């Protein structure tokens, strides 16, 4: 790309949110690990699985946050995939009022990711 495209404000906001989520997930994973040691009666396999899932999500959010700042094209595609998965999971649990809020947030995020200036920033 010969010319630099200015990062849209929404991309910066999404990057910050993803980096915060990554930090929270890392802390959550650490707390699950501490809980694994402190409360073995809960079940070691359950805590280990939850800790692993939390770590995977933390890495995902970290990649998204850094990728949004650095305009990595793969981060745009990854955000779309995560958004679609989130919509499907929210629709599967639509009977819960709580699932409507994340569904609405995900739809708004996807809307912004498909705006022409955002797509141009990622070279899409």
Image (cartoon, rainbow, N blue to C red):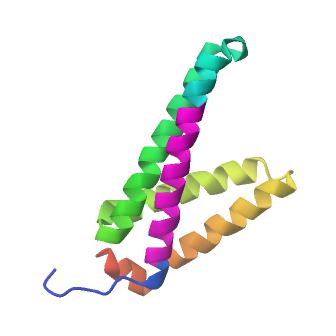
- Residue 33: x percent and y percent? 55, 26
Q: Residue at x 77, y 55 (%)?
A: 99
Give left or right: position of 83 versus 2.
right
Vertical arrangement, residue 9 with respect to residue 108, above or below? below
| Residue at (65, 57) in percent of width and height | 87
Q: Position of residue 116 (x, y in %)?
A: 42, 85
Q: Please tell me whether residue 6 is drawn above or below residue 102 in the rendered image.
A: below
Query: Magenta stretch?
Result: 11-31
Task: Please identify the quadrant where the N terminus is shown.
Answer: bottom left
Looking at the image, residue 75 lies above or below residue 53:
below
Count of marks placed on residues: 0
Q: Residue furthest left?
A: 2
Q: Magenta residues: mostly which secondary structure?
A: helix
Q: Nearer the viewer, residue 65 or 114?
A: 65
Residue 15 on the magenta segment: yes
Q: In which quarter of the view is residue 98 placed?
A: bottom right
Name which residue lies at 55% across and 22% down.
48
Residue 66 in percent (x, y) is at 35, 61
Report whether residue 115 is seen: no
Displayed quadrant of residue 63: bottom left
Q: Residue 29 in the image: x percent, y percent?
A: 54, 36
Residue located farthest toward the top when viewing the structure as drawn = 41
Q: Is residue 123 left or right of residue 99?
A: left
């Amino acid at each position: 790309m010969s010319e630099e495209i200015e990062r849209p404000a929404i991309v910066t906001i999404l990057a910050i949110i993803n980096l915060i989520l990554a930090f929270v997930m890392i802390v959550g994973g650490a707390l699950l690990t501490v809980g694994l040691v402190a409360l073995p009666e809960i079940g070691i396999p359950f805590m280990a699985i939850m800790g692993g899932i939390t770590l995977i999500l933390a890495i995902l959010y970290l990649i998204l946050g850094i990728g949004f700042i650095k305009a990595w094209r793969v981060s745009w595609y990854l955000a779309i995939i995560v958004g679609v998965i989130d919509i499907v999971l929210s629709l599967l649990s639509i009977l819960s009022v709580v699932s409507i809020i994340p569904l609405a947030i995900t739809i708004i995020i996807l809307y912004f990711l498909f705006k022409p200036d955002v797509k141009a920033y990622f070279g899409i």
